Amino acid sequence: EATRSDDAAGSMVQTSLMVQTGLMVQTNLMVQTGLMVQTNLMVQPSLIVQTSLVVQTDLMVQTDLNVQTDLNVQTILMVLTDLMVPTRLMVQPDLMIWPGLMVQTSLSVQTSLMVHTSPVVQTSLMM
């Protein structure tokens, strides 16, 4: 009988072959007065063949799916305000002043959205 090879995660093939052969020959010779010869020849052949084949295969598939998502949100709010007051002064017999008011406002909004997604797929095939 063949021994079995067994792995933790593998294939196992078990083969056992048993052959039995038996041959029995029996001879009886009797001699009596009056010459009586009796011969018995008995042949019993027996052939027993047993064959068993066991194939066992374990297939294990492991899949690890790791999804990493980094979300970076940067918001830059810039408010620039320039206030300029020009004044014109004219001197005449009468004093006249013309003030001019100039307001400059600039609004700058910068928003950057960074999404970093890295899928990691690990597949290990064990036979």
Image: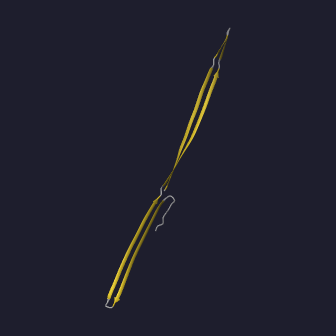
Q: Nearer the viewer, residue 109 or 91?
A: 109
Q: Position of residue 59 (x, y in %)?
A: 47, 56
Image side of residue 117 versus residue 38, left or right: right
Q: How is the image coloured?
A: secondary structure
Q: Position of residue 80 (x, y in %)?
A: 62, 27
| Residue at 44 percent of width and 67 percent of height | 16
Q: Is residue 108 above or below residue 57?
A: above
Q: Position of residue 79 (x, y in %)?
A: 62, 28
- Examine the image and state in which quarter residue 104 appears: top right
| Mark count | 0
Farthest top residue in view: 93
| Residue at 35 percent of width and 81 percent of height | 41
Image side of residue 123 versus residue 88, left or right: left
| Residue at 38 percent of width and 80 percent of height | 25
Farthest bottom residue in view: 33
| Residue at 41 percent of width and 68 percent of height | 50
- Examine the image and state in which quarter residue 75 appears: top right
Q: Is residue 124 above or below residue 88?
A: below
Q: Position of residue 10 (x, y in %)?
A: 49, 59
